[in-house]
């Protein structure tokens, strides 16, 4: 049983790596036959760490890619001292901060780097918080965000396939370019603020109530 589970975990990981646009639910259904929704829920619960481990891997490699491109990165939180990234002189690790302090840091930042969990049909409010605070958000996208985010206009986007530490990949080049063009950066922040203003909790709640 353990070897079978390990083999399936590897299969799920490999499938997600090759199909980064698929949801975890789609992946589990593909890799393991489930006759009922209850069986699917149990399989998702059993193999959920395949998703979280892969997300952590991509997040770490994203950071490594940007560090290799000589981009200064400030990180606030726990656990990053165990990633080996602190060997880079342009990696700056800080203690965790509160939500309010985080918003204040966003307002002082040129770029907010976002990497979502495996949300292929959703979003993270961190994207809109960064935009509202006047930072350019660099993030991966989703089917939901594809209709909202406009790469090079109100944000910078990347795909998981862009993450490669060997050379300056697409997202690294985008960040370097926008940091070298203050006028373009300012225009993008203004577009981002306008986008964030259309996606407040109040507006979404009002829309949900009306549609109900």
Image (cartoon, helix red, strand yellow):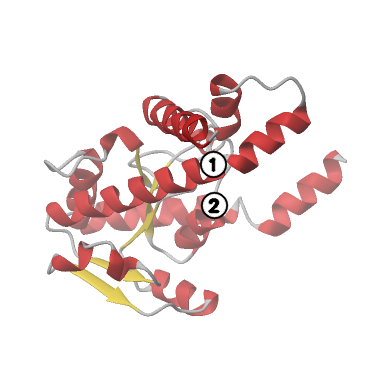
Is 163 on the left-hand or right-hand side of 28?
A: left
Q: Which structural element holds mark 1?
A: loop
Residue at the right extreme? 212
Q: CA distance from mark 2 to mark 1?
A: 8 Å
| Relative depth, front residue between 95 and 99 | 95
Q: Position of residue 22 (x, y in %)?
A: 50, 28
Q: Which residue is mark 2?
A: 124
Residue depth check, mark 2 versus mark 1: number of the one nearer the observer: 1
Q: Which structural element holds mark 2?
A: loop
Which quadrant holds the C terminus?
top right
- Contact between marks 2 and 1 (CB within 8 A): the answer is yes
Q: Position of residue 93 (x, y in %)?
A: 28, 74
Residue appearing at x 21%, y 53% in the figure: 64
Label 2 neighbourhood size at 10 Å, few (<14), some (14-19), many (20+)? some
Q: Position of residue 8 (x, y in %)?
A: 49, 29
Image: 21 above or below 139? above
Which badge, 2 or 1, is on the more N-terminal residue?
Answer: 1
Numbered circle sitting on residue 28: none
Which quadrant holds the N terminus?
top right
Q: Which residue is mark 1?
A: 119
| Relative depth, front residue between 31 and 110 | 31
Residue appearing at x 57%, y 36% in the figure: 144
Residue appearing at x 47%, y 30% in the figure: 12
Residue appearing at x 52%, y 56% in the figure: 128
Label 1 neighbourhood size at 10 Å, few (<14), some (14-19), many (20+)? some
Q: Is residue 20 in view?
A: no
Dividing the picture into quadrants, the one containing residue 161 is top left
């Amino acid at each position: 049983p353990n070897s079978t589970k390990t083999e399936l975990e590897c299969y799920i990981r490999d499938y997600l790596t090759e199909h980064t646009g698929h949801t975890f639910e789609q992946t589990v259904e593909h890799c393991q036959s489930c006759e009922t929704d209850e069986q699917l829920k149990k399989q998702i619960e059993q193999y959920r760490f395949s998703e979280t481990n892969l997300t952590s891997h991509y997040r770490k490699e994203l950071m490594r890619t940007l560090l290799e491109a000589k981009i200064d990165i400030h990180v606030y939180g726990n656990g990053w001292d165990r990633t080996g990234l602190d060997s880079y002189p342009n990696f700056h690790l800080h203690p965790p901060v509160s939500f309010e302090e985080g918003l204040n840091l966003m307002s002082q930042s040129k770029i907010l780097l976002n990497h979502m969990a495996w949300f292929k049909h959703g979003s993270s409010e961190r994207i809109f918080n960064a935009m509202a605070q006047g930072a350019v958000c660099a993030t991966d996208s989703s089917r939901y965000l594809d209709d909202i985010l406009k790469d090079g206009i109100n944000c910078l986007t990347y795909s998981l396939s862009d993450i490669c530490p060997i050379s300056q990949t697409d997202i690294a080049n985008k960040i370097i370019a926008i940091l070298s063009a203050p006028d373009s950066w300012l225009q993008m922040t203004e577009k981002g603020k306008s986008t964030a203003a259309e996606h407040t909790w109040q507006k979404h709640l009002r829309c949900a109530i009306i549609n109900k």
